[in-house]
Image: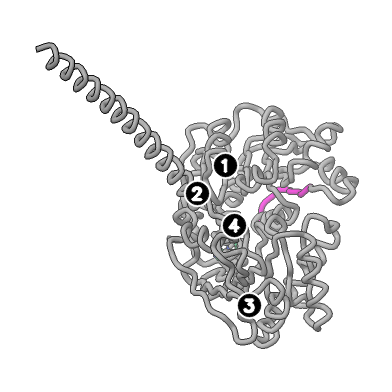
Amino acid sequence: MTFKELGLVDNLLKAVAEKGYTNPSAIQEKAIPLVLKGKDILASAQTGTGKTAGFTLPILQLLAASKHPKYRPIRTLILTPTRELAAQIQENILVYSKYLDIRSAVIFGGVKPASQIATIKRGVDILVATPGRLLDLENQNKLSLKRIDFLVLDEADRMLDMGFQRDINKILVLLPKKRQNLLFSATFSKEIKKLANGFLHHPTMVEAEPENSTVEKIIQKAYRTDKSKKTALIIKLISDGNWQQVLVFTRTKHGANRLCKKMIQKGIKAAAIHGNKSQGARTKALAGFKDGSVRALVATDIAARGLDIPLLPHVINYELPNIAEDYVHRIGRTGRAGANGEAISLVSSDEIAYVKSIEKLLKQKLQTTVIDGFEPSEITPDNEKPKTKEQKLDEQRQRQQRRKNKLAKTNSQTRSGQYAKSKSNKSKNRNKSNKRF
Ligand code: AMP
């Protein structure tokens, strides 16, 4: 299949070819013709599948083919959970719309709004936004959403995780009823389905890969160790392997800062990216990581979600996520564009239950090894490990069973007691009657 066969116009084909894309990805093959036909879509796709071009290319084509008032109202709204993802989408739009008369802009919090307001005032066809800043500017009458023809909700699952449900609802009532809607999500929870039912019109389901599947080419390894040995181990792995571009995940913002500091002390150029960092620091860290001046980018799940870093060879889980799906998102940062990638997890005793949940989700075992000098010093007894959902359910079932057994036993005892009583009464009566006769 070629981009031309998908029905894209020459000006887009030229831009796509210059970007170096030869063939459409799976999600692009499925989504582009549907969007061009005016359909609402509900798409399951993670970052790395080419989903951004999947929705921006057809929207650009439809926008370019339609007339707009001279003042250029916003006709497409793309909502994303994070600033980085918003900026990334905007970068892609600029590349794809190079040969079209289309203007786009991006707005997000953490920076002064003045220049964003000025850009919007000049007129933009496409606005990429995070929900908070969009509502702020709308409340101040700095923008209007009354002429929206296309709405895209990107990484909708993460938006809900980040508590944007109320903001999304507020935004939806600001939009005209007649419009085309596209929803992209890596996972399909009940909440996502509910959200989708609320605003999509007869959507077509589009799937890039089976839900929660990991990219086959990613080599996944787990190293058992102690919590206290993790920092030394990660520094050893990066130094011995001479890895030049490593994305490291921690569970907390403080953990990211601490690890980053230690790495820098040991001569590894590192930067942290998380919600407490200013937008300037986040942009600088990401740019440094992309241009190679930052060797290790230490990130929390939310900050890293949706980051497009091409051909990332190594991802390390310094700490495992407590939500198994996040593991899939994390390791999805490696093995991009058909390249081999390696995802390594450092597992301490208190994280064994997380490994089990991940293995259950992936339906495969993580290859676990121990590195000399970093062995776990003690094997935590089973009763000290955090319990998995499955373990908790099992225990609940066992408790219910025990209760049932006990009840059954008591009932049978009562019955047999009554039986014994009635038997002895009967025999007494018999005796009585025997006596009578
Ligand atoms: P996305 O999933 O949209 O974040 O895209 C992931 C990466 O794949 C980005 O670096 C895109 O530039 C790249 N990409 C998107 N579509 C294609 C394609 N058809 N061929 C090669 N690379 C692509």
- Using the numbered discs, state the Cα–Cα distance from disc 2 to disc 3 in whole angstroms: 51 Å
| Picture residue at 49% right of the left edge, 64% below the top | 23
Residue designated by label 4: 386
Q: What's the amino acid at mark 1?
A: Leu
Whichever of callouts 4 and 2 sits on the residue coming sooner in the sequence is 2
Q: Is residue 101 a member of the stretch shown in magenta?
A: yes
- When the figure is inspected, residue 306 is found, relative to residue 181, above or below; the finding is below
Q: Where is residue 206? Give x, y as percent.
A: 47, 47
Q: What's the amino acid at mark 2?
A: Ala
Whichever of callouts 1 and 4 sits on the residue coming sooner in the sequence is 1
* For the residues bearing labels 2 and 1, Cβ distance under 8 angstroms: yes
| Picture residue at 72% right of the left edge, 36% below the top | 167
Q: What's the amino acid at mark 3?
A: Ser
Residue designated by label 3: 377
Q: Point out the stretch of residues depicted in magenta.
A: 99-107
Task: Looking at the picture, tell me which residue is in the foreground, 410 or 286.
Answer: 410
Task: Looking at the picture, tell me which residue is in the foreground, 136 or 218.
Answer: 218
Residue designated by label 2: 31
How many marks are shown on the rendered structure? Answer: 4
Label 1 within 8 A of ligand 1 by Cβ:
no
Q: Secondary structure at mark 2?
A: helix
Whichever of callouts 3 and 1 sits on the residue coming sooner in the sequence is 1
Residue designated by label 1: 182
* For the residues bearing labels 1 and 4, Cβ distance under 8 angstroms: no
Quadrant in which the N terminus appears: bottom left
Q: Where is residue 434? Give x, y as percent.
A: 12, 17
Q: Secondary structure at mark 3?
A: loop
Q: Where is residue 191? Give x, y as percent.
A: 57, 38
Q: Residue lying at the far top in this picture: please name it.
A: 436
Q: What's the amino acid at mark 4?
A: Pro
Whichever of callouts 2 and 3 sits on the residue coming sooner in the sequence is 2
Q: Is residue 26 visible?
A: no
